[in-house]
Structure formats: structure tokens, C-alpha cells
Amino acid sequence: MTSPAGLPPTGGGSGEQQRLKLLAVTACPTGIAHTYMAAEKLAQAAEQLGVDIKVETQGSIGAENVLTDNDVRTADGIIIAADKDVDLSRFAGKRVVTVGVAEGIHHPERLIEQVRTAPVHGGGGGGTSTSSSAGSGAGGKERSVGYKALMNGVSYMIPFVVVGGLLIAISLSLGGHTDPSGGLVIPKDSFWMDVNNIGVIGFQLMVPILSGYIAYAIGDRPALVPGMVGGWIANTGSLYDSEAGAGFIGAIVTGFLAGYLVLWIKKVEVPKFVRPIMPIIVIPIVATTALGLFFIYVIGKPISWVFEHLTDWLGGMTGTSAVLLGAILGLMIAFDMGGPVNKTAFLFGAGLIATGNQEVMGMCAAAIPVMPLGQGLATLIRKRLYTEQERETGLASLFMGLFGISEGAIPFAAARPAQVIPANMLGGAVAGALAGLAGVEDAVPHGGPIVAVLGAVSGVPMFFVAVVIGTVVTALTTVALVDVSERKRRGRSMVDGLAPQPELALAGVGVGTDGLGAGGGTATAHAPAQRTSSAPASTGVSEDEVLSGYLTAQTVKVRLDSGDKEAAIREMVGLLAATGKVTDVEELVAAALRREEQGTTGLGEEIAIPHAKTDAVTAPVVGFARSAEGVEWGSLDGTKAKLVFMISVPEAAAGDEHLRILALLSRKLMDTGFRERLMTAPDEAAVLDVLREIR
């Protein structure tokens, strides 16, 4: 047999038929159920077809069964079944097929056949990610290249926003004081000035990081430098004669420009002797120079001209209605949070302080904290719409809002611009208009509740009324728009024939958690027992307890009486309540039904795993029941659910153990023999015996 990648085939000895050796990577957005289901299905299909396979899972608990350099060197082909970015640079010179994770679950045999004739991944430009290689395979619903690239940039930007913003806020609150000529001032050469400077560096890096990692997700390593340099140029208005840089919106533009520019350069045919230095010298230099000059001379000049005239236009409005002026300034402040539109309004208000007109700055000061406060509040109002990482960013955003740091809302605006920016602008306009109506004045060029606390604001009660109302408007509008967007997206998915992936979103895992840590055994078609070796050892658990004691004889029912989904969930909740760990039955039912609204938890193969993360339970608890007739659960494959697991954990649940159990459960349920044993077990004790196989 000839290796598809042009390498000698691997496998048996000289006298036996050599076996095809494949590698695979599976990954889904939340990294729990479908990641492991796809891995198990691929392993089963490979075993049936007489193919060796090793599967790396990039789940919420990190990368497991990591593919080594030796694995890649001896492999005949690679299958990528993922709905997120997977770095393909290590697979240069190998046949690679790239599809969505659902294809790995539903058509593993087809993928194994496809990889035999898949195109060879070149990797000449330093490798590409799945974003830039979406066309290398057939089938599978994938997120768009633009979406993946934007999320990649946002995930790397968030730590810089949080660290920079919190350090600035702490230094201002503990070391700052008001000064009519300089706003909130920290004494030079003081300890708090050093803390402030560190925070400022974090903020300065925020925009280039966003741009750089958007570019990286599109064009891989050669695009990182032009993306970051382009983002720095976009944020440095002095390079193109503008008082304010283009901010995070400019960074998004430069990120995409850099990424696609690099992809275009990679397609240029060059002499063979030049190819080795293309990704490390030629492409970064050419792309960085071209993008930088393009921004300075082509994009930057119009930006400068527009905002100079915008300032003049605002200057002509000072005699108009204070309410109208406040609304316009609020819209501008909220539009790009530290970008050129925001800076134009801010500098206009700050410049009028010296003339004795402090009302304009009062309008700006009321609008400045609305965006971070509103986005932070939104994550508290509707937690289910946000990942755990987004909720943590929301808490930091709330803190930054108190200190007038509008950039705290940028991660939300960058991730969902169509929903967040309009909501921010509406809340900012309301806050600015109310401050203008009440004649609020601000004597220093800064905003947020901190300036009122330090005595720089007149009309303090109305100032806080304006801030609070603007914040609530932003939060409620954001929640409404995000909810509508999610419903539309789910509707489109159903029309396309792919319902939203019924992930076990218990951990609230956010962007950027994948690939952290490694472990576990080698998942091959000939060692199924090793595929679950990464589970924690079960110690101190009595014989009637499985899954680390989360599932016991109390929470097993051989016959589920209910005939529809809602009734089945209620029956399962009643089963969990027998443990004494459920404090509010109705809330647990409601939480599970809310999860079903996001997308069915019917996984196919006659399996459903309804679940909820709620404080209606005091500790993790798992139940299992069988339905002889099956319950209609909206599963992707159209099967009724006959094996139903109900999982619930408290909001504050932490650690990796329950994630590992979920992963093991999802993987084990793909074993046909295991499911058959569960279905035929005569009583609760026999069911527990079968479930003890999950270890």
C-alpha cells in the first residue's frame, strides 16, 4: 500500500497486510459532548474498517490523547472534525480532510474513505488553521471564517482589557484626586502612578492583540506581525494626523485586511529557493509594510478629515437644545468606546471646561460608564445567553464602569457588534440626554461614578439617575437583541438541516480554554479500554454509587412513565429530588426547560441528556431512566429517546471532575454494546452494574 502523503505505509510486519494509519482531531465549541462522541464514532468506524486511528480530543478539560510528532510523521492521513479553530501547521505534507464535528458523529466511515484521496496540506506559509482550510473537506456545518477569526481575536484581547482596566481603576481610586485642569490626577513618581502605567500598557496592547489574532486565525503565523503592527497603527492617530486613533473598530479592519493579504501573498508563485523564507521573512515584511502604508496614506487621512469636521459640527451645536446635544454626545461616546468617535465627543466636552461651560462634559461623563455597566448587568440578567468566561468578563466590566473606563465593554462589542453597539448607543443617548436636561456639570475631563464620588460633579442625584437609567436601557436592549439573534440563528440551523449542537453547557467554558494541558491514554481502534484512562480513579464510593457518587440507586429508574419531553424532565427532577440535594424542584424544571429552548439535548442514538446548572441543587447529581416506547426529544437523527440521563450541578460548581464524567458518559454512550446492556438490564441493580463500566 502506498501512503497517501507519499510516505511509506505503517503497520504490520513484512509478511502481513499493512494497515492504514490515520489521525484525527475532534473539537466542538463547548468541548464536552460532541467532542468525545465524534472521537468514539471515528474509533468505532476505524475498527470496523480495519484501520488504525488515534484521536486527539480538544475538550473543555484540555487536549487529551495529544498527537505527537512521531504520530504525525508516520500517519497516512488526518481527519479534522471540529467547529472551532484547529492549528493545521503540524500536518504539513499530509492528506487532511476538514469537516464539522457533526460529520464525525454521523458519517465517520465516509470521512475515513474521503481522507484516502483528500488534498495534501501544504503548510508552506507556516501552516493554516481550520478557518483558512474550510474547503479541504466535504460536508459538515462550520462557523464562518470571519466568525472564527473575530472570536479568536476577542479571546486573546479579553485578558488585556481586564488587567489593564482593573489596574487603572485601582490606581485612580486609591491614588488619584480631582484637578480642574487635569481630571483625575495621580501624583507623578508615586507608587500608584507606576500601577497606572502598567495598566495603560495593557490597554495599549489590547487593540494590536485583537487585530493580530484576527489576522492569525485567517493567515496563520505569517499574518501575526502585520496584524499587530496594523492594529497599533490604527490605534495611533498621530501617525495619520488624527487626534484619536481608529480604536477597536480599526483593529478589526486591519486584522481582516492583514489576514487576507497574507493569504493572497501565499498564492503567489515564487522560485523554489525563496519558499523556505517566505513565511518568516518575505510575507511578514511585505504584508506589514503594505498594510501600514495603506492605513496611513489611504484610510488614515479620510478618518482624520471626518473627525475634524465632526468636531466643528459639534461646536456649532452648543446653542441648541441641551437634550438633543446630550443625546448626540451619548451616541458618540457609546459608539466605539475609546475610538475616534468617542474621542471626538470627549475632547469636545473636555475642551469646553476651560471656557467655563461644564455642562457638555457633564453629558459625556454620564454616558461614559453606561456601556461597561450595561454589558456587565446584561450578563447578570440573562446568564444563559453568556459563557462563563463572558460572565466573568461582565463582572470586570461592571468594576471598570464605576471608574469611567468605557473600554470594559469592548470585548462584548467586538464579539457581537450588531447587537451590543446599538444597545450601547441607545443607553448612552438616554444618559446624555437626561444629564443635559438636568443641567449636570462636570469640572474634570473624566466620567463615571468615580468623578461624582470625588466631588467633581454638580447635580449628583440627577447624574446617578442618568447613569442608572442609561445602564438599564443598555442591559435590557442587549439581552433582547442577543436573544433574538440566537433564536434566528437556531432557526437558520434547523432550516439548513442541522439543529444547534446539543452541547452539555454545564461548565460555561469560554473561548480560549482549549488546548490547555494534556493527558490521557492513546485512543486507538485497538485499545478501547484506554480511551477512558484519563478519568479520575474512583475511591471511597460504595457499590451502589457510580460516576463518582453523582448517580446512585436512588436516582435510577428502570421505566420512565412520561410520554413527552416536559413531563419526562419533571419525572427526572422528581427522581433527583429523592436525594435531598434539590432545594427547588420547580426552578430545576424551569432551568432544564430553558436549556432545551437553546437547542435539544437529544443526542441521537436514542439518547437524551437534559441538564441544568442552577442553585436549585446543592451538589452535583445525576439520574438515569429508561423509556420502553421512547420520548420525542427532537434528536438530530429523528430517534426517540429511550436512555435518558438528567444532570444538574450548582452554579458555583468548580473543578474538572464533573467535566471528565460528562466526557466519559458522552463517549461511552456511543458504544452500541453498552447501550444494549443498559436497555436490557432487568432492574436498578443491573443498571448500576452496567454504568460501572464508565471509569
Image (cartoon, rainbow, N blue to C red):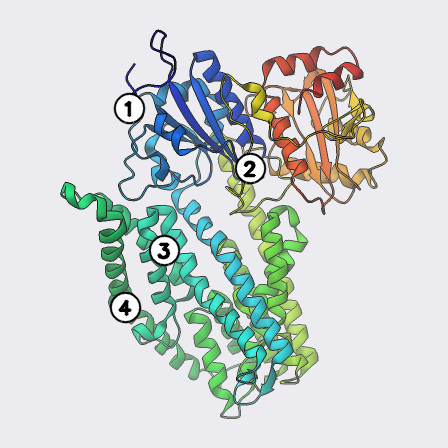
* Residue 511 visible within the image: yes
**What residue is shown with label 1?**
7
Vertical position of residue 259 compared to residue 137: above or below: below
* Residue 323 visible within the image: no
**What residue is shown with label 4?**
296
Discs 2/4, front: 2
Task: Look at 43% across and 50% down and name the residue there.
Answer: 150
Mark 4 or mark 1: name the one nearer the start of the chain.
1
User: What's under tag 1, amino acid-wise?
Assistant: Leu
Give x and y (percent) for residue 484. Answer: 56, 47
Disc 3 to disc 2, C-alpha distance: 26 Å
Disc 1 to disc 2, C-alpha distance: 33 Å
Q: Residues within 10 Å of mark 1 (few under 14, many from 20)?
A: some
**What residue is shown with label 2?**
31
Query: Looking at the image, do the residues carrying marks 3 and 4 touch, with CB atoms under 8 Å apart?
Result: no
Q: Secondary structure at mark 2?
A: loop
Mark 1 or mark 2: name the one nearer the start of the chain.
1
**What residue is shown with label 3?**
255
Disc 4 to disc 1, C-alpha distance: 48 Å
User: What's under tag 3, amino acid-wise?
Assistant: Gly
Give x and y (percent) for residue 553. Answer: 81, 23
User: What's under tag 2, amino acid-wise?
Assistant: Gly
Mark 2 or mark 4: name the one nearer the start of the chain.
2
Q: Is residue 488 or residue 627 the one in the foreground?
A: 627
Q: Residues within 10 Å of mark 4 (few under 14, many from 20)?
A: many
